[in-house]
Image: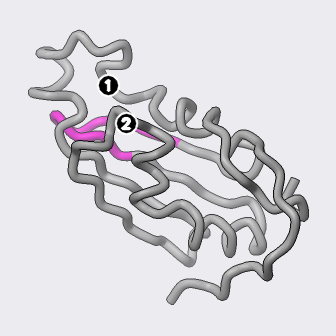
Amino acid sequence: PLPDPLPPGPTRRAPLGLVVGARSGDKGGNANVGLWARTDDAWRWLAHSVTTDTFRQLLPETRELPVTRHPLPNLRALNFVVEGILGDGVAAQARFDPQAKALGEWLRSRHLDIPETLL
């Protein structure tokens, strides 16, 4: 089960990477993006704030693609699988990041409203 959400409070627009780490990679034409929180409170926020809809908003290139979210509570982490972002795979791709290695860092650079208690 997911933890209880953080209580409401003031937020500030800031890069996601101030609160979470990320790692990404590929498997054929799909990308995996893992996000993990450093603290229990950051996990409480991450688990309820970064949904598949939020993910698609932060990474517009995923809006039309199937995205599946897998919560990993014991690791304070979320894993997202983005189907088809790499087309037929690395060898058939002219995308700037054909192996999706930078996708996690791209996501961490995106801004959203983050509770000030986490910053």
Which residue is found at the position 31% from the left and 52% from the top? 81
Which residue is found at the position 34% from the left and 32% from the top? 61
Magenta segment = 23-32
Asked whether disc 1 touches disc 2, contact meaning CB atoms under 8 Å apart, the reply is yes
Residue 78 in the figure: left or right of residue 100 = right
> Regarding mark 2 in the picture, which secondary structure is present there?
strand
Pointer 2 residue: 25
The residue under label 2 is which amino acid type? Gly
Which residue is found at the position 74% from the left and 52% from the top? 19
Q: Are there few (<14), some (14-19), or many (20+) residues within 10 Å of tag 2?
A: some
Pointer 1 residue: 99
Residue 60 locus on image (x, y percent):
40, 36
How is the rendered protein coloured? one colour
Q: On screen, 68 above or below 4?
A: above
The residue under label 1 is which amino acid type? Gln
Number of labelled discs?
A: 2
Residue 54 locus on image (x, y percent):
48, 55
Nearer to me, 87 or 111: 111
